[in-house]
Image: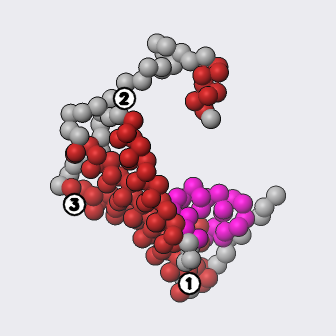
């Protein structure tokens, strides 16, 4: 069982730690900006069109590239967590100090918030895709069998 190490405030404000917080801020900002920006751009390019599989794949590929770049940016300075859940898991696993984890979370949440404000400013207030996805199978009207659910889960 891993022990939680709370760390110290002095250690959390060293230059190396501050660089790590800045790396997490920038990498999360870029990831959210590129990922959500791709969804906004797709919605703008295909107004009044159905959200099809190719559009979802394009948005997913953009998220994948954005995550690759974000992790590459932060890997040498902070470990490239990008996601607060990753930091939380490392804190719970005892691989990361609690105080440092809290500062990582603050940097990541601020980065994503700033990215959303930048997107709102850059796009003039456009929103992400708000279209209804028409699925053949849903739990209420057309339930899936156990093997169909197993196939979709893998």
Q: Residue at x 53, y 15 (%)?
A: 143
Q: Residue at x 22, y 49 (%)?
A: 126
Magenta stretch, residue numbers:
79-99
Label 1, secondary structure: give it. helix
* Mark earlier in primary sequence (2, 3): 3
Which numbered circle lies on residue 134?
none
Residue 143 visible, this angle:
yes
Disc 2: which residue: 133
- 2 and 3 marks in contact (CB < 8 Å): no
Quarter of the figure that contains the N terminus: bottom right
Find residue 145 and report its horizontal and vertical position in percent.
61, 16
* Mark earlier in primary sequence (1, 2): 1
Q: Quadrant of residue 98?
A: bottom right
* Mark earlier in primary sequence (3, 1): 1
Disc 3: which residue: 122
Q: In this rendering, which labeled residue sits more in front, label 1 or label 2?
A: 2
Label 2, secondary structure: give it. loop
Q: Residue at x 48, y 60 (%)?
A: 67
Q: What colour-coding does the image apply?
A: secondary structure
**Label 1: how many Cα within 10 Å (few below 14, some 14–19, many 20+):** few
Find residue 35 and report its horizontal and vertical position in percent.
38, 54
Q: Nearer the viewer, residue 99 or 136?
A: 136
Find residue 65 and report its horizontal and vertical position in percent.
44, 59
- 3 and 1 marks in contact (CB < 8 Å): no
Disc 1: which residue: 16
**Could you give the CA–CA distance between mark 3 and mark 1, rounded to whole angstroms?**
32 Å
Quarter of the figure that contains the C terminus: top right
Residue 108 visible, this angle:
no
């Amino acid at each position: 069982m891993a022990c939680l190490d709370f760390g110290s405030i002095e250690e959390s404000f060293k230059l190396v730690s501050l660089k790590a917080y800045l790396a997490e801020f920038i990498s999360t900002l870029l990831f959210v900006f590129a990922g959500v920006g791709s969804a906004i751009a797709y919605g703008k390019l295909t107004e009044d069109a159905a959200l099809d599989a190719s559009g979802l794949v394009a948005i997913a590929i953009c998220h994948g590239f954005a995550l690759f770049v974000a992790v590459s940016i932060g890997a040498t300075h902070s470990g490239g967590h990008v996601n607060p859940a990753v930091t939380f898991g490392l804190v719970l696993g005892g691989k990361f100090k609690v105080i440092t984890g809290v500062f990582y979370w603050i940097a990541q949440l601020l980065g994503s918030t700033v990215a959303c404000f930048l997107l709102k400013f850059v796009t003039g207030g456009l929103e992400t895709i708000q279209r209804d996805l028409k699925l053949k199978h849903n739990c209420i009207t057309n339930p899936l069998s156990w093997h169909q659910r197993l196939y979709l889960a893998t």
